[in-house]
Every structure is written in structure tokens, then in C-alpha cells.
Amino acid sequence: MIGFTDFPVRNKTYAGANGSKISVLYNNALYMLKFPAVPVINKEMSYANGCISEYLGCHIFESIGIPVQKTMLGTYTKNGKQKMVVACKDFTAGGFVLQDFASLKNTIIDSAHNGYGTELSDIVKTLEEQTAIDPKLLTDWFWDMFIVDALIGNWDRHNGNWGFLYHPETDKISLAPIYACGSCLFPQADAEMMRKILDNPAELEIRIFERPLSGIKINGQKIQYFKFISSLENTDCNKALKRILPRIDINKIYKIVDEKPCISDLQKEFYKTMLRERKERILDFSYQKLRKREHSKSQAR
């Protein structure tokens, strides 16, 4: 765990509602330090586990081969109190400006909703009609991200926390690395809740099939990951499932969890259980169902 307290603080500021944030200079690079947020749902916790969730979520994306913000866990002491923080390397160096997907969505003049509306049909319309980035590249990126978010149980992937890097001088725009994974892996679950979920199959199933929901909506209702993916109704989602699932190495993910000494044994058991169960019962199940359907179609020809 790196102690960030004595590193120079910079004046760059960061938006977002998930905890306090400051910028520090570490090894001649700018990092955003994210502090743990006060829990909204579980009032019994002093602070949520969002820093751990951010670290694990980003490193899981990285293990699957998806470009992601570099993150480290560390500590920061203020007024005599030491807190765990997650340090996120600032990827806007070199004059780049981070533009979120909501700002791109606002360029679709006849869209029925504003940039931050997460109705899937509106998002798909933007993916197809925007002209800044190749539509197929952007569509694949969105659905690849959706599949990994299903694995890690991300309930807050909205239009404001993924996007693009824009360079004002060259007018070039490219996909930004994945960032903002602090709402995955049940950050407001304390030790008591983790033990309860691990010991009760019914509680575990709720966290696989019913919770969390995606931040994306259909007809105003948030998408249930299992129901949506296993329905096989969205062709682009099916293609992403086929691309991403073979790249998920559960043993590599276990190693990411196990190698952090600041995570308790109970937390490690909980995270690994949730990741294994969500992979097997959402992604593996849907993949096998898709393979069977494709095989049946090929046999019928």
C-alpha cells in the first residue's frame, strides 16, 4: 500500500458524485486519489468499499484485454486519520480532454432524450448515427463493456462515466480507457452482509439474477443483466458475449483478488465467489444457450 500523503497536491479537480477526489503528483505523473464514499444504502458501514471495487474492477477489465485506467490502492492521512484510497492515473496528459458519452449523445439533434438519458434505444441510435468514431468500433466497445460490467456487477455505468479523449489542436478523438468502476462488486456490503450472502444460497442467487441492475434502461426500467443477456435478443450483445467470454480467465482474476493484502480473507472469498457465480450462471449459461441455438440453425439448413 503506497502512502500518498506527502506527495505534492495539484490544482486539477475531478467531477463525479462517488466520494471526494484530489490530484497528486506521483512518479512525475498526475493521479486522481478517490476517497471512500459514505454509504447511502448500508448505514451501518463507516465507509463503502468503493476504492477496492474501483481497483478490482479496473484490473479485471485489464485482465480481459480491454484498455483501462491504471489504478493502485494506497493510503492518505488527513487530520490524523488514515484512509484507504484508490489512485487512478490521469490519462488526459498531453493536452487531451475527456469527453463523456453524454456529450456525444447530445450531438444527435433529433434524439428524444438528453445526453444523460440511458434508454437503450437512444444509446443505440447514438452509436449508429454519430460520426466522430467508426460506428462499429463504438458499438463493439459499448457491448464489450456491458458484458464485463455484467460479470463484475456494475450498477452505475451511465453516459457520464465512459467516453473519449479529444485533442483540441488536432481535432482527433479516440476511445478513452475504461474508468469509474467503483460501483461494482457490491461496495456497500459489509462483513455481516458478505457472510450472509455466502452462507445462504437464496441470498446469493438474488445477487446473481436480480441485483445489481444495469444503469441502462429499456422502456424506463433498468436492465436485469441475466434476463437481458440470456434472452439472446440483441445481436450486438451476443457478438460481444462470444468475443469476451473466451478472454475471461477466472484463475487470473482470482490472483488479482488474492494478491492484495489489504483485503480481508472474507472479502476475498466473497469477491471470488460472486465473480465465479456470475461468470458461470450469467455469461457461461448464456454462451452455451447461444451456441445451441446457432448449432440448431446450422443443422436446419
Image (spheres, rainbow, N blue to C red):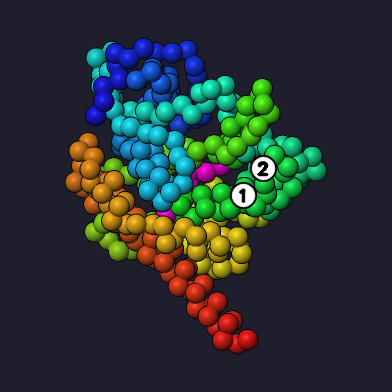
Q: Of helix, strand and loop, which mostly describes the magenta segment?
A: loop
Mark yes or no: residue 220 visible: no
Image location of residue 10, percent across then percent down? 44, 13
Residue 127 vertical position relative to residue 198 in the rendered view, above or below: above
- Residue at 49% over, 55% down: 147
Mark yes or no: residue 292 visible: yes
Return the mark for residue 207.
none
Using residue 47 as the reference point, say whether residue 156 is left or right of it.
Answer: right
Pointer 1: residues within 10 angstroms few (<14), some, or many (20+)? few
Using residue 272 as the reference point, say whether residue 285 is left or right of it.
Answer: right
Image location of residue 85, percent across then percent down? 33, 28
The verdict on residue 71 being magenta is no
For disc 1, the marked residue is 137
Quadrant in which the N terminus is drawn: top left
Q: What amino acid is at disc 2?
A: Ile
The verdict on residue 153 being magenta is yes
Range drawn in magenta: 151-158
Of helix, strand and loop, which one carries label 1? helix
- Quarter-of-image position of residue 42: top left
Of helix, strand and loop, which one carries label 2? loop
Quadrant in which the C terminus is drawn: bottom right
Residue 87 vertical position relative to residue 154 in the rendered view, above or below: above
Image location of residue 143, percent across then percent down? 56, 53
For disc 2, the marked residue is 133
Using residue 277 as the reference point, say whether residue 146 is left or right of it.
Answer: right
